[in-house]
Image (cartoon, grey):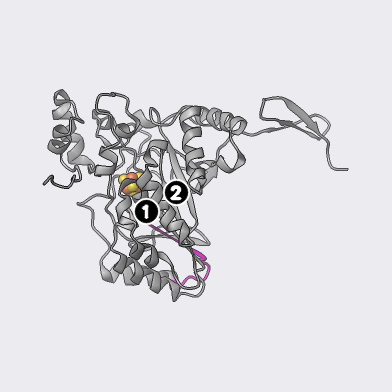
Amino acid sequence: MNAAPKNLRQLSDLSDAGLVDPDKRVALERVAAQYAVAITPAMAGLIDATDPHDPIARQFVPDPAELDVRPEESADPIGDHLHSPLAGIVHRYPDRALLKLTTVCAVYCRFCFRREMIGPSAKPLTPRQLDAALGYIAAHPEIWEVILTGGDPLLLSARRLKQVMARLAAIDHVKVVRVHTRIPVVEPSRITAELVRALRAKSKATYVVLHANHARELTGEARAACARLIDAGIPMLSQSVLLAGVNDDAATLGALMRTLVECRIKPYYLHHADLAPGTAHLRTSIERGQDLMRQLRGRLSGLCQPSYVLDIPGGHGKSPIGPSYLTRNETGGVLVEDFNGVQHCYPPKT
Ligand code: SF4
């Protein structure tokens, strides 16, 4: 009998799978000593090991370029720590708070903005810290929405998720629970009926936001996992990261957005890649991102348009950074650009 495919967590596993160049082994040992490595069978199975530019490999297989840390990069690129009143909570915006339930992920993305805070060696939230974090949410009536994140919250057992959801359900002012996860694509078998039931909190709206960066990630199994969530009444949105060599061309990005919509997942955010250490080789310029957004606007349905956003370094929150289609003219009206790049006058209000 064949053994079940295993998660690739060691460089030797990656070597055995033909995913790393033996000549780069010394540099990769240094990368792996610094940043966690894991590739699930679902993702490893998508990689074409003969393609040096494979977009799935680029997201998960460590690269010696990660040793190149730039001065502008930071261990906390979006300023989580500045807005963390206690372990497990980030309260950056008035009406919502992050609850970081775990520090582990099924895969470790090479561009991860929390790469210095997550991984098997990071400290998970203790039961006492979880009590305190839930107490903080209960004591802040302005918190309307709680975002479960991590690490990946859907690595928790259905039993533990159900407990957390029940405790959030008991907080009257929390109306929405949003779950940020990569699990439906990287380990779709975890999306069981029991886990789906656990995510439904009484009298709260649960949304699941899927992190996916390439249409190939939406395999048949991944689509079925998403359908299990959506059919149970859990709406899904997506977030993607604009990544050099992965999805930074209009055809690839457009195919991703269309595939998501075909799976009944509304594209929500396209993130400009954060200034995480050792990730310069995966970042594009903002100008490139704006150009891609213009190209998407021309060729894809409005349903397929995400908001292109930047998390401003230093903890200042997200801002939309997509292209502007308006220019003011000398009469006080505006010129509006259409999807072909042609400008039209719109008169001032009389
Ligand atoms: S799944 Fe999310 S938190 Fe985990 S490594 Fe990838 S980007 Fe980071």
Number of numbered callouts drawn: 2
Tag of residue 339: none
Q: Secondary structure at mark 1?
A: helix
- Measured as percent of width and height from the top left, residue 137 is found at 43, 69
Q: Secondary structure at mark 2?
A: loop
The image quadrant where one finds the C terminus is: top right
Q: Nearer the viewer, residue 10 or 72?
A: 10
Residue 68, placed above or below residue 155: above
Does 344 sit left or right of 106 as displayed? right
- Classify mark 2 as within 8 Å of ligand 1 or not, answering yes or no: no
Residue 52, placed above or below residue 126: above
- Measured as percent of width and height from the top left, residue 31 is found at 21, 35
Could you tell me if the residues under marks 2 and 1 are in contact, i.e. CB atoms within 8 Å?
A: yes
Q: Residue at x 29, y 58 (%)?
A: 102
Q: Nearer the viewer, residue 18 or 145?
A: 18
Is residue 263 highlighted in magenta?
no
Q: Residue at x 55, y 31 (%)?
A: 290
The amino acid beneath tag 1 is His
- Measured as percent of width and height from the top left, residue 149 is found at 37, 56
Other-residue count near label 1 (Cα within 10 Å), few / some / many at <14 / 14–19 / ≥20 = some
Does 187 sit left or right of 213 as displayed? left
Q: Residue at x 28, y 71 (%)?
A: 128
Q: CA distance from mark 2 to mark 1?
A: 8 Å
- Extent of the magenta region: 138-150
Tag of residue 315: 2
Tag of residue 81: 1
* Sooner in the amino-acid sequence: mark 2 or mark 1: 1
Q: Nearer the viewer, residue 185 or 271?
A: 185
Q: Quadrant of residue 73?
A: top left
Asked whether residue 208 appears in the rendered view, the answer is yes
The amino acid beneath tag 2 is Gly
Q: Quadrant of residue 133?
A: bottom left
